[in-house]
Image: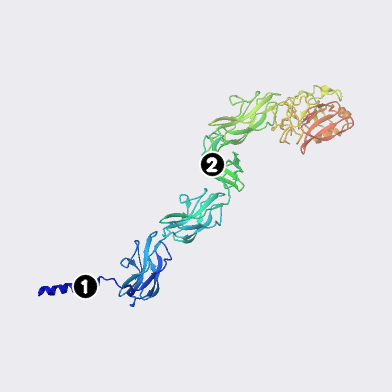
Amino acid sequence: MRKSILYPVIIIVSSLLISCEKEIDPALLPVVSTTEVTSLSYYSAQSGGVITGDGGYDVIARGVCWSTSPNPDIKGSKTVDAAGTGKFESLIDSLMPGTTYYLRAYATNKKGTSYGLQVEFTTKTLTLSEVTTSPVTSITTTSAVTGGTISIDGGTPITARGVCWSTSPNPTLNDSITVDGSGSGNFITTLTGLKTGTLYYIKAYATNSNGTAYGNEREFRTQSSIPEVITAAINSITSYTAISGGEISHDGGETVMARGVCWSTSPNPTVNNSKTVNGNGKGSYTSTLSNLKSGTQYYVRAYATNSRGTAYGNEHIFNSSIGLPELSTIEISEMSTSTAKSGGIITHDGGAEITSRGVVWSTTQDPTIDLSTKTSDGSGTGLFTSSITGLSAVTTYYVRAYATNSAGTAYGNQVSFRTRSVLTTSTITSPTGKVWMDRNLGASRIATSSTDDQAYGDLYQWGRGTDGHEKRSSQTTSSLSSSDTPGHGNFITVSSGNYDWRSPQNNNLWQGENGINNPCPEGFRVPTAAEWEAERAYWSSYSSAGAFASPLKLPVAGSRNYSSGWLKLDSFGFYWSVTVSGKDTQSLLFDGGNAYMYYSRRAYGFSVRCIKDY
């Protein structure tokens, strides 16, 4: 009895289990389709679905589900997009960049869940950003303005942005850069510290987690300017020289046309002071400073010049080594038969105290202080006057000023002079009451006729002393003298300029009995133009005949040409006065039919007749 009951129970239970495992009738489930995936990005996408039937039961949930594996279902990632039938849109987020996903729309009613067709999509792969370089504006010698536009960030935040630049194409972050914040969009930046007149290449840049992207390359040139130069250290310093130089690191964008160093005893020397000229172009160069004064502080700067101007380097200061003094000898004055005046001018002490100074003289050239014939005229720099004594008459002497400091003794230029003669001839007194020598200087006798050649005497260039040039047979030279005593006995010819044997001219020669280079015997001098005029007034005629007939018995001694040195004899008499007229000097001229005062060029050789000084 019990056994027969058991079988029906098993059959019933089995039937129920079989009934639970039966599939739901699709007709009872919603009808849904999956829409196309759009708006793909690195981390999201847009999709959705369309529910065209609810299976007879209300749709209580809908959305999309997705997975990196096919046939995703609502057990995995999904959206929940309200309820009901019709079209719906779903935002899919929290995706991974560069990843392939599978997606299906779903709809749920109380009978179950149905799915639309599966679609496949891949999110965008993370990339570098996209950036463009802005045009360059506001260009100066050392700066410019530019920037960039970041239109796409590449899927990750822009952590750095700016502009990089170089003097070579394709600049990178390894070159000069600006840093201009973060994020996408536009930015503006200023490039500074640029070199003048230089071509630059620039690119905007933007950095995200994937790396650095660069914009298009642009190029520009800064405005040109003066060069950039550095002054080299001073070395090899002596009393009169030193070595320096410079290095031109940048030409300012223009060719360096001149370079060197300049120096002065005052700060900030310029090319208007002493300077060297050491070629052109960039790079290093060496300069020798010369003609320095010993024991003197100098300021030195390198310089470089282009079309924009002159630039100067840093300033160096140095002291030249202590050296000998610098001085010149004063021309001889107040000559007599046994004395004369001279002296010196000490313009620089050599960097050490002047302990002694004076003049030294001898009948041979280049006298030194080893001789006893010297003066001692105090100490220090500046002008000093020396009295030379113990001389012999009608003798040529050589004189040099000297100055002594701790470095030694220096000498000035040598000057020479001839002591005055003692009057050995007779004198005559003219109708004017003046006492004259009875013959021309250099004549061996009183004239016996107008053309007595033994009475002609010597022919002096105006203002020169008795140094041998006055002899009619003396040699000639065209080298002008820069001093009152040329130091030789040549007749100096000249054919231009002031027509003077001395350059520059000196109007103070022969002025008085103690005048410079007075060739007359002691107590006598060269007459003035007025004194000649006074004598001429007593002549019997204004001619060579009247000149000889006068108490002075003046012969036609001739002249010597200033440009050739040739002698002109037997028809003219030319006699110097001391009266200066402009660049010329007045002289007495007479010939067979004339006698008058004449303006003569000083390089002529004329006769001299001396008058007693009162």
Q: Distance between the residues labelled 2 and 1?
A: 108 Å
Taking 161 as reference, is 573 left or right? right
Per the rendering, the mark at residue 15 is 1
Q: What residue type is labelled 1?
A: Ser
Up-down: is 526 above or below 153? Answer: above
Classify mark 1: helix, strand or loop: helix
Per the rendering, the mark at residue 247 is 2
**Residue 298 visible somewhere in the drawing:** no
| Residue toward you, 167 or 539 | 167
Which color scheme does this rendered protein use?
A: rainbow
Q: Where is residue 589 in the image (x, y as percent from the top left)?
A: 84, 32
Up-down: is 289 above or below 439? Answer: below
* Label 2: few (<14), some (14–19) or many (≥20) C-alpha neighbours in 10 Å: many
Looking at marks 2 and 1 on the same chain, the residue that comes earlier in the sequence is marked by 1
Up-down: is 344 above or below 392? Answer: below
* Label 1: few (<14), some (14–19) or many (≥20) C-alpha neighbours in 10 Å: few
Q: Position of residue 329 (x, y in %)?
A: 64, 32
Picture quarter with the C terminus = top right
Taking 92 as reference, is 249 left or right? right
Up-down: is 463 above or below 143? Answer: above
Q: Position of residue 486 (x, y in %)?
A: 70, 29
Picture quarter with the N terminus = bottom left
